[in-house]
Amino acid sequence: MQTGSPERRQAAGWEAAAEAAMKQVRVDTGAAGEPEHKAGEEQPKDPAPAQPRAAEEGDARDPPRQPPTLSPSKQAPARVVCAHGKPRSKGRCCKRSSGRRCEDLRSRRPVTVDSSKARTSLDALKISIRQLKWKEFPFGRRLPCDIYWHGVSFHDNDIFSGQVNKFPGMTEMVRKITLSRAVRIMQDLFPEEYNFYPRSWILPDEFQLFVAQVRMVKDGDPTWKPTFIVKPDGGCQGDGIYLIKDPSDIRLAGTLQSRPAVVQEYICKPLLIDKLKFDIRLYVLLKSLDPLEIYIAKDGLSRFCTEPYQEPNPKNLHHIFMHLTNYSLNIHSGNFIHSDSVNTGSKRTFSSILGRLSSKGVDIKKVWSDIISLVIKTVIALTPELKVFYQSDIPAGRPGPTCFQILGFDILLMKNLKPILLEVNANPSMRIEHEQELSPGVFENVPSLVDEEVKVAVIRDTLRLMDPLKKKRENQLKKKADALNSAHDTALERSRQLGKPLTGKEDPVESAIAIPPDSSTNSEAHLPSICLKQVFPKYAKQFNYLRLVDRMANLFIRFLGIKGTMKLGPTGFRTFIRNCRLSSSSLSMAAVDILYIDITRRWNSMTLDQRDSGMCLQAFIEAFFYLAQKKFKMLPLHEQVASLIDLCEYHLSLLDEKRLVCGRRGTSGDRPPYSGTPQEAAPFAQPADGVPQPHAGSASKPSLYRRPLS
Ligand code: ADP
């Protein structure tokens, strides 16, 4: 696998430039012994709190902040000049540059992280922050932090700015039923591409369908002896899971009604190592939803069963240590092996498994590329509904944080090395210690080196990728370099005209190096290269054709109209049909209303989410499929759907253009006129130039539903 995206190489270039500049400053000022950077020195002082809180105690304990200085050496007074070539003393700069200098200073303060809600990831987070030389606020902070680290969900804290490590709705999206539904839509559209997820049925709703389909296949092939695994929705750590050989074995009584579940084909032939079944926990960073950015950690964990594997038979179905790889279950087996080595024991690094496979001649590049493809496709299945959650929780135009999230992908390798997706975890365990039984019944938490090695790297490097100041610094350095080049050219030209050599005062290179270097970029010099590899948009070309549901979600969101809602009302649906010109002699508006009522009622009876009435995204997709099939009868489903999306986008872009022209002709501004219905209001919220506008408090927040339709 290739490493080092162009951006990263570019970043490395700027870091190198900063490093070089810093060395020069030291020589020039004779201040080699000066600390490079005093942590916290640029932080605004908190005003005295009205009421003391734990958070403020944390602030109060900070060492007094020193004004930034570039102390000249006593022996060799350095001629320090500001960026404008004016002499400067005791850290002061000429008036002209004070704004920019303030900006410089702001961008060199340490990144602040609120870890007050980090819960079980706290230990790994603390180590990461320390390694990065950032500033932790363990009790929270009255002033906003750059990054908020939540242990459970987006809603752990009320935040209105900065970045938070959770997306709204992610926990709901990766529940077993929701994930199965999202993948099934993709399987309907692209069956070959999504065959990495076992066939699943949702219980109790699809129990009859499950029985009927199994019977049908068995009738066609009497030798087929399947096994199924029943997993309660929202369960984790193997809780409530059991294997069955026949649909009649499902424990329907009582539990299913109160606790819905997924029943899934059981993968009977997993790859074994040392005769044991194992799975892989891979860490995936969803860095941004729009534009979609996905990173995969180069290493993960492999969790082993503790009883030798046999294909399921009625006698071993209940042997959990043979069939379930959950660490939380197997730790209670007498055979569990704790090991500090990454390639032995019941929990190992994934890289050690790959090393072992490679030594046996396995093409591990192919294994990796299949895994990357599985991850990208799964994220593509999840993002449409995530966007609906996002616009509901963080409506454009209101202050809110930007989001990123580390996901835990559980993957099983089949005997033929094909990766199978078991599940996605919104809150993968980031614990770096494990329980050890010292004597019978006496447990103690001891550090787990394998966990620490993998998890600290994932958290630390996620933080590095999310570093809010890095981008600013890179931009500043680039600007400085550009300014430097042009100033140098001008100065050279002038000195050539005057026939004079450059004097120090005029030398733009010296002016530039008098500006303090980017010390926090340098603080990464001691760190290993980033363990997260970008896979999207890097491989976007190969996967973009799969993003049909994403485009449907954009249409859905556009017609939601009222901010904060997640369901489409009947008027919104009618407006969608009208604006996209989908009604015809064969599809009257009365038929549209019936379609809406029919599908919406069915979906609302199935889904647990009764927050608001109306048509959910899944129901909209079903209606869309129906309309696509009606309009483009002869094509395969994905082409029908793609054609209908193209048609809708085309009509909407025409409409937007028309409204834009009317708007220009109309009153003063570029805004098209407001037609009166909330559903009509949504498209107009987009700025006339089609460029989504960041709003106060979330400068880099992706604009999800005001973007122009392509
Ligand atoms: P949980 O969230 O409770 O851990 P999982 O879906 O991860 O639920 O399943 C628990 C374990 O069961 C997995 O780690 C894996 O070992 C096994 N398992 C789950 N689904 C399958 C499957 N379809 N085929 C084979 N084994 C499976």
Image: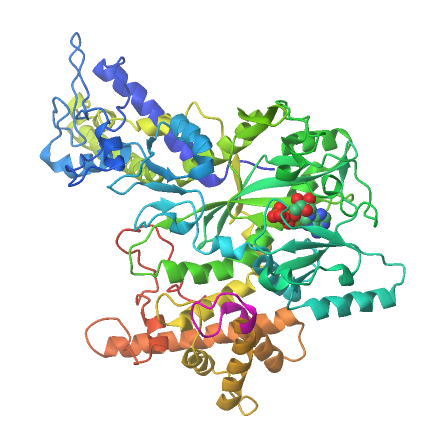
Q: Is residue 344 above or below residue 575?
A: above
Q: Residue at x 35, y 77 (%)?
A: 680
> Would residue 620 appear left or right of 150 to someone viewing this image?
right
Q: Quadrant of residue 134?
A: top left
Q: Is residue 443 above or below residue 102?
A: above
Q: How many marks?
A: 0
Q: Residue at x 24, y 78 (%)?
A: 665
The stretch drawn in magenta includes residue 357: no
Q: Is residue 563 above or below residue 581?
A: above
Q: Quadrant of the C terminus?
A: bottom left
Q: Which residues fall within the magenta stretch? A: 605-618
x, y percentage for residue 380? 55, 56
Q: How is the image coloured?
A: rainbow
Nearer-the-camera pick, 53 or 255: 255
Q: Residue at x 62, y 31 (%)?
A: 349
x, y percentage for residue 191? 69, 62
| Secondary structure mostly seen in the magenta stretch | loop
> Would residue 159 appear left or right of 172 to someone viewing this image?
left
Q: Is residue 664 above or below residue 503?
A: below
> Would residue 253 appear left or right of 509 to someone viewing this image?
right
Q: Quadrant of residue 168?
A: bottom left
Q: Quadrant of the N terminus?
A: top right
The stretch drawn in magenta includes residue 611: yes
Nearer-the-camera pick, 329 or 466: 329
In this view, which residue lies farthest toward the left?
Answer: 95
Q: Residue at x 44, y 54 (%)?
A: 291
